[in-house]
Image (cartoon, rainbow, N blue to C red):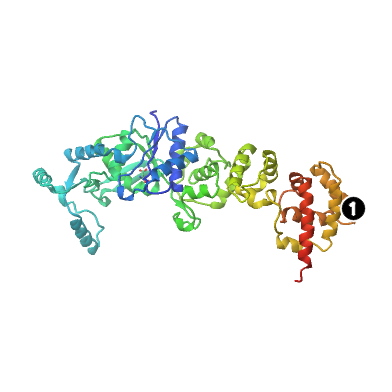
Amino acid sequence: MSTIRTRFAPSPTGFLHVGGLRTALYNYLLAKKESGSFILRIEDTDQSRKVEGAMENLIETLHWAGIEFDEGPGKEGEFGPYIQSQRLTTYQHYAHRLVEEGRAYYCFCTPERLEEVRRKQIAQKINPSYDRRCRSLTKEETVQRRKAGETFVIRMKVPFEGELTFNDIIRGEVTISYGILDDQVILKSDGYPTYHLAVVVDDHLMKISHVIRGEEWLSSTPKHVLLYQYFRWELPRFAHLPLLLNPDKSKLSKRQGDVAVEDYRLKGYLKEALVNFVAFLGWNPGDEREIFSLGELVKDFSLERVGKSGAVFNIEKLDWMNFEHLRRKPDTDVLCMLKEKLASSPFAGKHFTDAYLLSVIGAMRERVTFVRDFLEKSPYFFQAPSDYDADVVKKRWKKESPLHLKQLVEEFSALENPKKEEYEAALHRAAESLRIKNSELIHPLRLAVSGIGAGPGVFDILFILGKEETLRRINSAIKELSAAMALPK
Ligand code: GLU
């Protein structure tokens, strides 16, 4: 079997869309699985839509996601350049070759004339298309008009009747009748090719074996197949990926949530989670497994397991995958991420030892979906509570609580380098001497040290904070909450 070569061919018109990430990923997975090559090609032939910096951003985002290309801008291979605007003479050569071979023709129609034709067709309720006026120009007329300096485009000739069939790995056989195709412009008046010509020429010259792209390109494929036939080139295999849908089954759009990979990255999603999630938008391994690393995806991926029907973008599932991937990360990796997060947080000026942060990670690991949750769900590990959750105070802080906690302070003070079990035993002793239930101490204690009502085991919190800090927090809660209770309501 010949070498697998796939490509991702974005137009540099903005941020990388999650749909684009999926296309890039599937192309990458297939190439890696088959020990082939994955190529990045920048399709910038529509210069009016080009956005400054978009290509660099795309490359950076792919790199972040771990989707590395083998050939592309900045990684020149045998088939470069990989930016279409740097390949114009190639496209011009092939467009003119088609004219010479009678498969395409010069069209001199002005935009005004085309508009006029369009208007008339709409008035007659005909689908607007080019009326093929220049298709019947003689060679002499054409030469003359070109000599006179008239601007022209080149259009491909589409047969007047009949139909065309091609095979798609995901959709099977696709047949369309020529009647619905226009005599497509392949070379514009400014010498730039249109997408249709450039994509075919490049996929051929770059020896692309599989064209994997979004469903929105399916309707363009017949034009491409026709061009392959005109050039007498071997067809690549096509695979058109299912649409991405919002949970309400409408087409995924910005109106219902973020669509740029950049947005998810900024929100703190792990690349492992986003890649895993995006892989499942249309594909599944055929069994129960859902959590995959990029390497595992490479091993298990196949285009045969990509479905036809639209794939729903379910953000809860993405969150769950983030939770699962974060859980699986080694402590040292989480430590790096936590330190980075702390550095840009209100706690930035404070110093925490690695050992301290690792114990926080140990206590919170099963409770966090994002790295930022360490700070948001347990800020008390980084700063003594400055206020106390009013609902918890109402429910858990009794008028006897100050007295109870004072007893606890006494018990705790006598401990030397206590571990969590010793804190626990000391609390039991205090409860016993006060003749109350353990829980009557535990709830106000948790409130005193953390300011809130939920979190990891309270004795784990005490151990992490240390005795001195624990006592300081209990004493200040006694003072502040008693004072607050004394205020007239
Ligand atoms: N340039 C097209 C895009 O922006 C590529 C379509 C294709 O893969 O052929 O998505």
Q: Is residue 374 left or right of residue 110?
A: right
* Whole-percent x, y for residue 410 in the image: 86, 51
Q: Is residue 55 left or right of residue 267?
A: left
Dot 1 crowding, Cα within 10 Å, few <14, some 14–19, many 20+: few
Looking at the rendered image, the quarter that the C terminus falls into is bottom right
- Image quadrant assignment for residue 416: top right
* Whole-percent x, y for residue 332 in the image: 63, 37
Instruction: Pick out the residue farthest to the front.
Output: 349
Q: Is residue 148 above or below residue 331?
A: below
For the question of whether residue 131 can be seen, the reply is yes
Residue at image location 53% in from the left, 34% down from the top: 295
* Whole-percent x, y for residue 281 in the image: 49, 46
In-front residue for pair 377/284? 377
In-front residue for pair 169/19? 19
Residue at image location 57% in from the left, 52% down from the top: 316
- Image quadrant assignment for residue 335: top right
User: Disc 1 marks which residue?
Assistant: 432
- Image quadrant assignment for residue 404: bottom right
Looking at the rendered image, the quarter that the N terminus falls into is top left
Q: Amino acid at mark 1?
A: Glu
Q: Is residue 74 above or below residue 192?
A: above
Query: What is the tally of numbered marks visible in this picture?
Result: 1
In-front residue for pair 317/481? 481
Residue at image location 46% in from the left, 51% down from the top: 259
Which quarter is ligand 1 in?
top left
Residue at image location 18% in from the left, 40% down from the top: 99
Q: Is residue 3 above or below residue 121?
A: above
For the question of whether residue 443 can be seen, the reply is no
